[in-house]
Image (cartoon, rainbow, N blue to C red):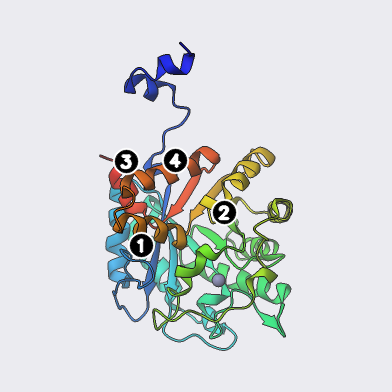
């Protein structure tokens, strides 16, 4: 009889030999907060609701009660403008959200700010662009200003999502200059995945309309090319990123592992994105797979690959299962 066979003899033995245990400490719950306070269901993500600011407080309380340490805040504002300068308005909506959540939860909840141009510009591209060319410097400089505004309002972690070269450098410098040297930067590295698709319909005022967007292959990582991914990680870490987010998670498990091997001292977050959420929800709805088991299997595989934390729209559901 083999060693593993002997261990499989009992469930308790299996528990003893497990190298890790997924817990609510690993979870970050992303929330969509609407300035117009509409609380409809997110059409492309069944089971997820837009929140008013008051409801965001209630949802964050649920997260805290469930043992989830952090939330990622997406703000859906009423009026986007041409150049995104609405982002720097005094007491803009994002700042209101952070100020309120900080005053309610203080140290009990990590507030992560997703910083991206698509929240603010009418064209809803993640980056500034001209004639189909990404304007990296201009984007990075604007992201840095937004980061300071959010840090001022209470964001604990700044997560630049634009994939602009130099974004971490500019944000770090601006935060330091603004007196926010204790605010960490958590940089996204996204492969050019189709799994973001349901999300594109979430951030527009008229929910359900897909945003236009620039050709994302110009600034995201080729899904085939892991070398390009590691190059980008090198750049972000060398410029001061405290944490790296691998996005999406399920199709990039190998990249999570490579990150862990290549950068053993850098915390790694994995983002289980809207398309992953949709795959789980729709297969469960059709009765093809058991939702709870599928959810736990995906989260555990992401953790096993090397993620230190997982951002997931299933956050509250996963916490309920883990707390059972
Ligand atoms: Zn964006």
Confirm or deny contact between disc 2 and disc 4 (CB under 8 A): no
SS class of the residue under badge 1? helix
Q: Nearer the viewer, mark 3 or mark 1?
A: 3
Sequence-wise, which precedes: disc 2 or disc 3? 2
Residue 141 pos. (x, y %): 67, 73
| Residue situated in front as seen by the camera: 164 or 90 | 164
Residue 95 vs residue 131: left or right?
left
For marks 3 and 4, give the CA distance: 12 Å
For marks 3 and 1, give the CA distance: 28 Å
SS class of the residue under badge 2? strand
For marks 2 and 1, give the CA distance: 27 Å
Sequence-wise, which precedes: disc 2 or disc 4? 2
The disc placed on residue 245 is 2
Q: Nearer the viewer, mark 2 or mark 4?
A: 4
Residue extending farthest top: 1
Count residues near mark 3 (Cα–Cα under 10 Å), then give few for <14, some for 14-19, many for 20+: some
Name the residue that disc number 1 marks. Answer: 103
């Amino acid at each position: 009889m083999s060693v593993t066979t002997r261990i499989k003899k009992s469930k308790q033995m299996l528990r003893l030999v497990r190298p890790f245990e997924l817990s609510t400490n690993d979870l970050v719950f992303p929330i969509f907060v609407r300035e117009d306070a509409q609380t409809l269901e997110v059409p492309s993500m069944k089971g997820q609701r837009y929140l008013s600011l008051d409801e965001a407080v209630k949802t964050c309380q649920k997260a805290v009660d469930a043992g989830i340490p952090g939330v990622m805040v997406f703000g859906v504002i009423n009026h986007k403008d041409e150049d995104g300068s609405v982002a720097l308005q005094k007491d803009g909506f994002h700042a209101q959200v952070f100020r309120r959540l900080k005053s309610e939860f203080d140290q009990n909840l990590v507030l992560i700010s997703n910083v991206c141009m698509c929240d603010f510009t009418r064209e809803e591209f993640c980056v500034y662009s001209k004639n189909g060319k990404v304007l990296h410097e201009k984007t990075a400089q604007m992201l840095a200003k937004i980061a300071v505004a959010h840090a001022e309002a209470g964001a604990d972690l700044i997560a630049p999502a634009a994939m602009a070269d130099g974004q971490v450098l500019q944000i770090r410098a601006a935060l330091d200059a603004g007196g926010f040297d204790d605010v960490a930067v958590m940089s996204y590295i996204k492969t050019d995945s189709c799994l973001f698709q349901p999300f594109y319909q979430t951030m527009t005022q008229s929910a359900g309309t897909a945003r236009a967007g620039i050709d994302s292959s110009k600034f995201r990582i080729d899904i085939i090319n892991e070398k390009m991914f590691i190059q980008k990680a090198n750049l972000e870490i060398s410029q001061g990123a405290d944490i790296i987010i691998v996005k999406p998670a399920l199709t990039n498990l190998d990249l999570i592992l490579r990150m862990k091997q290549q950068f053993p001292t850098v915390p790694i977050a994995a983002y289980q994105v809207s398309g992953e959420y949709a795959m789980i929800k729709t297969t469960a709805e059709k009765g093809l797979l058991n939702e709870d088991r599928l959810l736990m299997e995906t989260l555990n595989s992401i953790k096993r690959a090397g993620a230190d934390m997982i951002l997931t729209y299933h956050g509250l559901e996963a916490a309920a299962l883990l707390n059972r």
